[in-house]
């Protein structure tokens, strides 16, 4: 298995040589920190440290990642691209591995594509970004962000989140999160190689305003009749309708025998609902002969509507990538980051990383099985020890009982001998 993984990763490297790799990071070497800058945007006491580790379930000890290491801390780390990225006329693939070894209860694990001029030393929550993608978990909310920074014509850029909730994995396994933006203005979100969300960009983010709007110069005519039914003008209230009271004295109520009118006052029976009461009279309803139907506000073409054949082009002058997170409980592992415009490279990366995650899952199961077997063996040994102790206690009790019986017998015999001597 290990040899196959090495070959698979080598195949990815060979593919990289044939395509333009925008960014790749595996955190395997000792110099990884020279490529990444830790932000000082928060006081040092509030900032957590990323540690280079192989992880709990590594397949190759030399295969490292970085892991959050301090609880209730902010994390901000970024790395520059070799050259700025503009995805105009190109597909864009963003992919990375996430593993919540600590069973995360509240915290982010998303990644951001940053402008080329990002101030890495002060990179933080308010820093602009082009794309924010990845899992975010807190309590029962478990979602995958897919936020795009976009500017409509003559408007400032805004961060637009996906209009649907995209699920996120919350277990302790390693997962590969991937985000694809296509030149045909479509997208795809994948987790572990499986498509979770996909479709036209315009249907999943508010890129454009409505194509048509209500005509502001039109309003419902004052004489418009939109009442579908009216009270029948020929219907009359029956005579005596209101003569029947709503409540009546309870005919089954009886005056208590000990009731004293002088002391208790005049006795009155309790009131109950009158079964003959007909309620408020209302005329029957008939179809309105003047009904014109529901008034529909006339629509006009929206003067602010626009077409954009390049909605996908959200990565303009992107020159860095970074993590900007808050975690209540630390222990999230990150690895195998890829940014590319090559589908072939992405597919090779996905295949190799998924082979690794499968091997990690197998290693995790092996460890769990070994721990389970160890606990069961310890429990059996303890049970056997307790059984041996119980048997020893029973034997000791039997011996004590035998000794007591023997002593009692000897005592009785001594009494009998004494009695004979006295005679």
Image (cartoon, grey):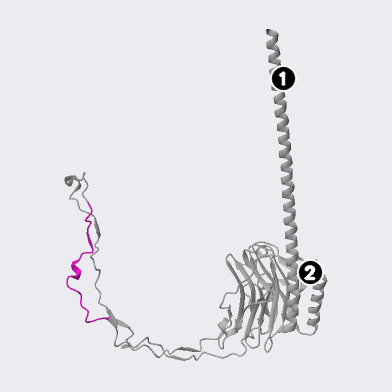
- Residue at 21% across, 56% down: 251
| Of residues 153 and 279, the one drawn nearer to the viewer in this rendering | 279
Which residue, as the protein is rendered here, is positioned at the far top? 423
Q: Classify residue 140 as left or right of residue 254.
A: right
Say the numbered circle drawn on residue 410: 1
> Looking at the rendering, which quadrant does residue 299 occupy?
bottom left
Q: Is residue 188 visible in the rendered structure shown here?
A: yes
Residues in magenta, as a range: 231-253
For label 1, the crowd category at 10 Å Cα-Cα, with few meaning under 14, some 14 to 19 and many 20 or more, is: few
Position in image of residue 147 (x %, y %): 61, 78
- Residue at 73% across, 73% down: 354
Q: Mark 1 and 2 residues: CB-CB less than 8 Å, in contact?
A: no
On screen, residue 229 above or below 330: below
> Looking at the rendering, which quadrant does residue 335 occupy?
bottom right
Magenta residues: mostly which secondary structure?
loop
Mark 1 and mark 2: span between their CA atoms?
A: 80 Å
- Residue at 79% across, 76% down: 8
> Looking at the rendering, which quadrant does residue 140 occupy?
bottom right
| Of residues 265 and 41, the one drawn nearer to the viewer in this rendering | 265
250 part of magenta stretch = yes
Q: Classify residue 187 as left or right of residue 385.
A: left
Instruction: Work out whether mark 1 precedes mark 2 in sequence or the reverse, and give the earlier one.
Output: 2
| Of residues 377 and 416, the one drawn nearer to the viewer in this rendering | 416
**In this rendering, the label closer to the viewer, 1 or 2:** 1
153 part of magenta stretch = no
The C terminus appears in which quarter of the rendering?
top right
Position in image of residue 192 (x %, y %): 69, 74
| Of residues 324 and 58, the one drawn nearer to the viewer in this rendering | 58
On screen, residue 402 above or below 43: above
Q: Which residue is mark 2?
A: 63
């Amino acid at each position: 298995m290990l040899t196959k993984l090495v070959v698979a990763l080598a195949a990815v490297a060979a593919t990289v040589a044939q395509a333009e790799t925008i960014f790749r990071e595996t955190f395997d070497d000792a110099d990884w920190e020279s490529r990444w800058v830790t932000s000082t945007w928060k006081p040092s006491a509030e900032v957590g440290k990323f540690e280079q580790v192989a992880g709990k379930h590594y397949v190759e000890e030399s295969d490292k990642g970085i892991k959050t290491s301090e609880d209730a801390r902010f994390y901000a780390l970024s790395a520059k691209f070799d050259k700025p990225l503009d995805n105009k006329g190109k597909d864009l693939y963003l992919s990375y591995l996430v593993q919540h070894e600590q069973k995360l209860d509240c915290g982010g694990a998303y990644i951001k594509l940053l402008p080329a001029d990002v101030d890495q030393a002060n990179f933080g929550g308010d820093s602009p970004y082009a794309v924010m993608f990845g899992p975010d978990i807190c309590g029962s909310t478990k979602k995958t962000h897919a936020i795009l920074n976009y500017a409509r014509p003559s408007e400032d850029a805004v961060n637009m989140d996906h209009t649907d909730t995209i699920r996120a994995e919350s277990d302790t396994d390693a997962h590969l999160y991937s985000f694809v933006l296509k030149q045909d203005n479509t997208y795809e979100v994948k987790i572990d190689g499986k498509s979770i969300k996909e479709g036209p960009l315009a249907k999943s983010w508010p890129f454009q305003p409505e194509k048509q709007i209500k005509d502001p110069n039109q309003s419902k005519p004052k004489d418009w009749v939109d009442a579908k039914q009216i009270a029948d003008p020929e219907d009359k209230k029956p005579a005596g309708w209101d003569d029947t009271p709503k409540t009546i004295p309870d005919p089954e109520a009886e005056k208590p025998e000990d009731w004293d009118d002088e002391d208790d006052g005049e006795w009155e029976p309790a009131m109950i609902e009158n079964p003959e009461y007909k309620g408020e009279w209302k005329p029957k309803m008939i179809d309105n002969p003047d009904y014109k139907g529901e008034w529909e506000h006339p629509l006009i073409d929206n003067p602010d509507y626009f077409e954009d054949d390049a909605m996908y082009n959200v990565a303009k002058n992107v020159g860095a990538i970074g993590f900007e997170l808050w975690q209540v409980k630390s222990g999230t592992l990150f690895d195998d980051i890829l940014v590319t415009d090559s589908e072939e490279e992405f597919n090779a990366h996905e295949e190799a990383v998924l082979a690794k995650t499968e091997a990690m899952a197998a290693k995790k199961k092996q460890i769990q099985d070994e721990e389970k077997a160890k606990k069961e063996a310890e429990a059996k040994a303890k049970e056997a020890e307790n059984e041996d102790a119980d048997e020893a206690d029973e034997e000791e009790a039997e011996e004590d009982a035998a000794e007591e019986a023997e002593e009692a017998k000897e005592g009785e015999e001594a009494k009998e001998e004494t009695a004979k001597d006295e005679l």
